[in-house]
Image (cartoon, grey):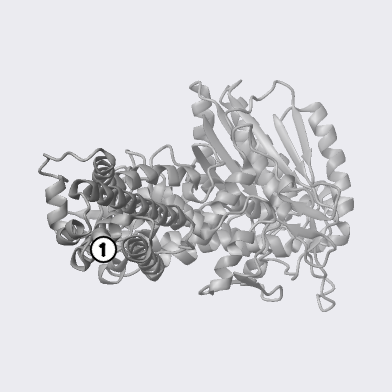
Amino acid sequence: MKNFLIGIGGTGAKCIEHLVHSCSAGLGPDQLWVGMIDQDEANGNVNKTKILLNKYINLRDSLRNENKNDLSNSSNLLKTKITTNNDSVWLPLKGADPSLKEIVLFDALKDEVKGLLSCLYDPQEKEMNLSEGFRGRPNIGAAAMLATAANEDDPFWAQIYKAIDAAKGGEEVRIFIIGSIFGGTGASGFPNIARKIRAIQSEKGVLSNVNIGGALMLPYFDYEVPDDIGEGEIYAKPNQFLDQTKAALEYYSKLFESDKIFNQVYVAGWDPITRVSKFEVGGNTQFNSPLFVETYAALGALRFFCEDNKIQENQEIFHIGKNDSEDILWSDIPNVSVNLNSKDSLMNLVRFAFSYNWMYGPALKGSWSKIKKYSNEHWFKRLILSNTYEDTIKSSTIGHEKNQEIISSMHEYSQDILTWISDMNYSTVLESDQKMKLIYADFFSEYSPKNNSQKISLKEKLTGSDKKEFKNLFHDNENITLAKIMSNISYLGTNKDQKGLGVFMDTLFRSCR
Amino acid sequence: MILNILKTLPWFILGSAIFAVPSILLIGALFAPVDVESSFLGTEWVAERFMNLDGILEDGQDPASATADFNYMFAWLNVNLLISTIVISLGWAIGSHFLNIDEPGKAKFFAITWIIVSGLLVGILLLVNYAILLWGDTFYAAQDITTASMNTMVLLTTIYYGLMHWLSCVLGTARQARSAVLFANQLPARNYL
């Protein structure tokens, strides 16, 4: 089975962030191609996800190398083989500062068509510079996307064409699209990209094996628009989100009745809507924090890709929201399948990231002369020394550049995981009466909602009392101590097909369960 | 945790058994009726090595009967020492799983704890020895042994059971706590050890 995920717009990119972390926890399929669509190439969230994807892919490649450092197929850590194009983002409109007028060749149109377009778009919209996205205007986005052909030579669409070819060869292909219903890019791209894929499918004469799923995000955040914003400025207006959503849902209702584009659609929303801390029209400063509801879209995608999920003939629509109380609990996180418990896997991942970031990662960093002080400890001898020892130099290669690169990459990735969960924990309930009862992050991180580029700062070092707080990390009964992890890492057996640093990484990961 | 303790216990038992089995055999032999003709633990041999033979004869005691009393006392001494050692060592072996070793490099700080536990054991061994051989009146044979032989017995039993404690701790300490026990971190690290 081949799996493809397309995140449209800033929301799509944000949901992919949740999905990547879920995949590193072992909730994903074996293989997944990920692509993003955003006209706002510099969008802060899109860039963040791009970087995260690269980190994941590089780290996984280093730790899933059968000859050197191998986690083995049985390990759930970084389980999913995620691939992406060299540039994971597809820009529907290429060229510098494109406008709708240029795209539709407005000046060359007949007068009656010009008149029609003028009815649909006001002068500002026609002239608007689209390099920072469609700014909450799906009517512009839809026109722009439909105006661009799905070109087989384009690296993004080449993947879709390949997928359809694979389906023609009898392989099942699952494509999942994530977008918001209330924005510009997502709302315009969601149905149109799916339609384009179906069009390619019929063009190639592929009648089966292609399943399309999607996650539609209903309004779940808004922001305060600053008073100083220019009068003529076009931007996504939060007070229009609900009206836009209502209209869009009516459209989808009709679409789903008449046309079976999607096999499964997951609809997620949030009430009350989360207030994000800073408003930006677009560009690299549009950098919104991860929010809890995006996890629903990510887990919906993973459910769609799960082999246990049998796609029905009829179009299925699923919706999800949290429990009625003001508390956001672990029980609000749905499982990917009967065999894939999301709560356990995500807790496992966070514990791993914590213990790696502050306990084990620092011990493994540096030259052998610094690291060797641990060489008499059981976990080190069994998991590191015996797997990195080289006869020719009669020493461990743990201090060598290649291994140190992996250790540093994992350190960085662990910080991404901790930052992600902490930011989600704080930002979801910012300025609301809701209480986030997932993790207790105060003892290892600081939250600065006004600092848009770095809302979360992780502590450099933990004090003894901070470490003791680890046993209260989750608002749940399933907490363990760091001493328990040390005990587990000393006793858990290793798999024979693991190699190098993969042995340690997998054992630590399993020790955090 | 329980599983980890169960994984370590066989190694603890092995370490203890190396010393405990000879000790139990000795205790069994000491409780057995005195074999006058035996060259090991025989009447003459014991009387010559450990007892004030002249004093026994002066008191009009039968050396064979005095030797039997001595054997009985020495058997009980060993029983007490063995139990003390097993209790303390097993306590450490199980307790080591609960030490707050939460990060690499922390185990060695618990060496002090192990030294205190081991010191406590040595103290108990000496206490048991002197309680039976010197201060107590439970065993009549205590009066018949020389000071030199008493000191020899105290020294040898303390070393013997001290070694038993050390070996059982080397093999039976929780893997993550091995740096706390003298030379225990020199053991090879395997999935089963």
Residue A200 horizontal side relative to residue A227, left or right? left
Mark 1 Cα within 10 Å, few/some/many (few <14, many 20+)? Answer: some
Q: Residue at x 78, y 66 (%)?
A: A430
**Residue A339 visible here:** yes
Residue B21 x %, y %: 27, 43
Q: Amino acid at mark 1?
A: Val
Which quadrant of the view contains residue B178? bottom left
Q: Give the total number of marks visible in the rendering.
A: 1
Residue A230 x %, y %: 81, 75
Q: Residue at x 80, y 66 (%)?
A: A223
**Residue A41 visible here:** no
Residue behind mark 1 = B154
Which quadrant of the view contains residue A258? top right
Which quadrant of the view contains residue A128? bottom right
Q: What secondary structure is found at the residue carrying circle 1? A: helix
In which chain is the residue bearing label 1? B
Which residue is more in the foreground, A25 or A139?
A: A25
Which residue is more in the foreground, B172 or A320?
A: B172
Which residue is more in the foreground, A370 or A449?
A: A370
Residue B145 x %, y %: 23, 61
